[in-house]
Structures are given as structure tokens and as C-alpha cells.
Image (cartoon, grey):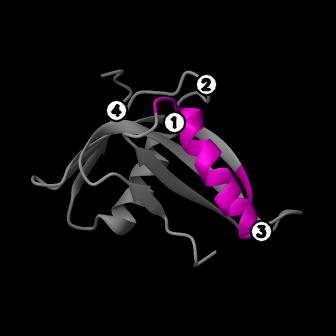
Amino acid sequence: MAAVRDVEIDPEGTFKYILVRLQRPGGGEQRDIVRGTKAAEFHNHIFEKVNPEMEKLGYECKCLGGGKIDHNSKDKKIRVFGLSTGYGKADHSVTVEILKKVYTDYEITWSDDKK
């Protein structure tokens, strides 16, 4: 699982994101990752890109929910909020903990706000 990055998000802007659980078939080791991009019109577009990539590496994927990320790289701030109509709301507190592993010098917050 070390080959898979915890976080892949756009470097700037406000965009959709999903929280994905990776697992080896048959159980065992599992891990949650964050993926987000402005290129996705809908949350499922992100999952449709991630799922085949992870399957090639031998993982099963499950989308745990989604929301939005507002990434301000100049001020080193990330805000996690909102929800996915299709997947439901991700546990933003889990997302923030994963983001903090990568963006160690950022101020990272979350809320249940829609905007």
C-alpha cells in the first residue's frame, strides 16, 4: 500500500473530493485515501478514475463519501466542507487527518457547511 499516495488533490481552488477506502481482496490491510480535482464535474468522475488505477495494483475500492475542498496554497489553508449527492457526506474529520499527513504546515479545517 506504500505505493499509493495518501492525497492527490489540485494545488489550488475549490473542487470536489472523495474519501476512498482501499482494501486487499478478502479483507486484511485497508487504508483511506483522499482524491479531488476541478476536472471532475461530479464526484463519481473521480471514483471512475481512481478505481481502475487501484484495481491494477490489486486493491478493492469503496467510496466512503465526498464533499468539497477549498485549497489556498498561498495562505497554506485547506477547508473541507459540503457533501456528495451520489455518495453522501464523507467523514470530513477523517479527511482532515489524512490531509494533515501531507500538508504538515497548513491550517486545515472542516465544517458541515454546504458552501
For residue 109: magenta?
A: no
Q: Position of residue 59 (x, y in %)?
A: 74, 63
The quadrant in which the C terminus is found is top left
- CA gap, disc 4 and disc 1: 13 Å
Q: Kindly report which numbered mark, 4 or 3, lies closer to the viewer in this rendering.
A: 3
> Mark 2 or mark 1: which comes first in sequence?
1
The crowding category of the residue bearing disc 1, from other C-alpha atoms within 10 Å (few below 14, some 14 to 19, many at least 20), is many
Q: Which residues are magenta?
A: 41-61
- CA gap, disc 2 and disc 1: 9 Å
Pick the front one: 37 or 82: 37
Image point 39% across, 51% down: which residue? 96
> Mark 4 or mark 3: which comes first in sequence?
3
The crowding category of the residue bearing disc 3, from other C-alpha atoms within 10 Å (few below 14, some 14 to 19, many at least 20), is some
Q: Kindly report which numbered mark, 2 or 4, lies closer to the viewer in this rendering.
A: 2
Which element type, helix, strand or loop, lies under badge 2?
A: loop
Q: To which residue does mark 2 refer?
A: 86
> Mark 4 or mark 1: which comes first in sequence?
1
Q: Position of residue 21 (x, y in %)?
A: 65, 53
Which element type, helix, strand or loop, lies under badge 4?
A: loop
Q: Quadrant of residue 23?
A: bottom right
- CA gap, disc 4 and disc 3: 34 Å
> Mark 3 or mark 2: which comes first in sequence?
3
The correct choice, above or below, for 87 with respect to 93 in the image is above
Image point 65% across, 60% down: which residue? 53
For residue 45: magenta?
A: yes
- CA gap, disc 3 and disc 2: 25 Å
Q: To which residue does mark 1 refer?
A: 66
Q: Kindly report which numbered mark, 4 or 1, lies closer to the viewer in this rendering.
A: 1
User: Given the current orientation, which residue lies at the most extreme front position?
Assistant: 39
